């Protein structure tokens, strides 16, 4: 009488163990949730290494005259830049790019270097 009970318990434990191990082996690639993670593409703003033109209100305006050599900004700051008769509101979303020529975002602004510092409130 004990032998069939023990065999039944061993069989149930084996089935339960197999279910647990296959649950860990399952890779969620083919489901809708898994596909969302793989199909997600960064936005144009996220792909822009020097930031992007902003529709938002600028935190400050900067007028750069002909002799200007540099522009200091903080990462994620939106600045209204006026140079050479051109004006643009720009958000400096530049993770990994601390220095670049302003002419990369405003044609005709040659000779001016943008220095991007990290926002102290965002540092750990």
Image: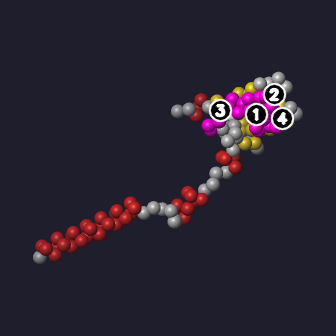
Mark drawn on residue 102: 1
Mark nearest the camera among 2 and 4 is 4
Q: Quick one: label 2, few (<14), some, or many (20+) residues within 10 Å? A: some
Do labels 4 and 3 touch, CB within 8 Å? no
User: Residue 117, how many percent across, how many down?
Assistant: 64, 30
Mark nearest the camera among 1 and 2 is 1
At mark 4, the secondary structure is loop
Q: Tell me how far mark 1 sits from mark 3, CA to CA.
A: 12 Å
Mark drawn on residue 98: 3
Which sits earlier in the primary sequence, circle 2 or circle 4?
2
Q: Which residue is mark 4?
A: 108
Image check: 110 left or right of 8? Answer: right
Image check: 89 left or right of 122? Answer: right
Q: Which residue is mark 2?
A: 64
Which sits earlier in the primary sequence, circle 1 or circle 2?
2
What residue sits 40% from the left and 61% below the top? 25
What residue sits 83% from the left and 34% below the top? 108
Q: Tell me how far mark 4 sits from mark 3, CA to CA.
A: 21 Å
Q: Which residues are magenta?
A: 95-116
């Amino acid at each position: 009488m004990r032998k069939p009970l023990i065999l039944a318990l061993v069989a149930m434990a084996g089935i339960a163990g197999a279910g647990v191990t296959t649950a860990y082996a399952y890779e969620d690639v083919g489901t809708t949730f898994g596909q969302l993670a793989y199909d997600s593409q960064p936005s144009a703003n996220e792909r822009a290494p020097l930031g992007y033109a902003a529709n938002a209100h600028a935190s400050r305006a900067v007028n750069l005259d002909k002799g200007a050599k540099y522009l200091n900004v903080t990462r994620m700051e939106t600045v209204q830049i006026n140079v050479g008769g051109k004006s643009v509101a720009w958000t400096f979303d530049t993770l990994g790019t601390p220095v670049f020529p302003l002419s990369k975002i405003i044609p005709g602004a040659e000779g001016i270097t943008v220095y991007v510092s990290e926002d102290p409130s965002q540092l750990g």
